[in-house]
Amino acid sequence: MSSNNHAPAHESASDTHHAHSHGHEAGHGTFKSYMIGFVLSVILTAIPFWLVMGGVFDSKLLTAFLVMGFAVVQIVVHMIYFLHMNPRSEGGWTMMALIFTLVLVAITLAGSLWVMHHLNTNMMPMSPEMMKNMP
């Protein structure tokens, strides 16, 4: 008495595929979408590399902000083209989890920067002589 785990003969391959989709509404990427994501990722990596290595801007702060901006855009490209995240996937739960994670990261970063700023502001200044006597 063996059980038959195979699809019945009257089911087509597409019916079998849909039966095993596990409730994912988001389609998996095509070769074209993966290539678009790859090309965008390479471009979004090459431009900041060129900005830094070429010394395009005199201001290091401007260069740092541009590199961070390109990093944010690249994160979005990866989420769309490689992770297939959109508001419809998993009934919207992946987007809710992403938003929750971003809120937690923002709170953690802002709180950490706030604490470090106030620690730096409220520390007693030390002269070089005082630092020599430190244990």
Image: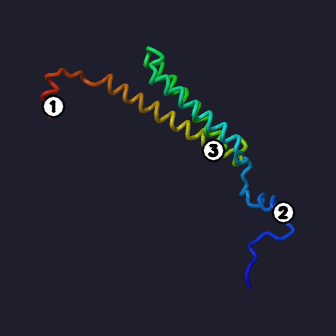
2 or 3: mark nearer the eye: 2
In which image quadrant can residue 123 be found? Answer: top left
* Of callouts 2 and 3, the N-terminal one: 2
Question: Which residue occupies the extreme right position in the image?
Answer: 10
Q: Which mark is residue 12?
A: 2
Q: Classify residue 131 by image quadrant.
A: top left
Callout 3: SS = loop
* Residue type marked 2: Ser
Question: Image check: 55 left or right of 14?
Answer: left
Type of amino acid under label 3? Leu
The amino acid type, in three-letter code, at marker 1 is: Met
Identify residue for label 3: 83
Spatial CA distance of label 1 from label 2 is 78 Å
Q: Residue furthest bottom?
A: 1
N-terminal-most mark, 1 or 2:
2
Q: Nearer the viewer, residue 73 or 106?
A: 73
- Decide: is 42 above or below 8: above
- Numbered disc total: 3
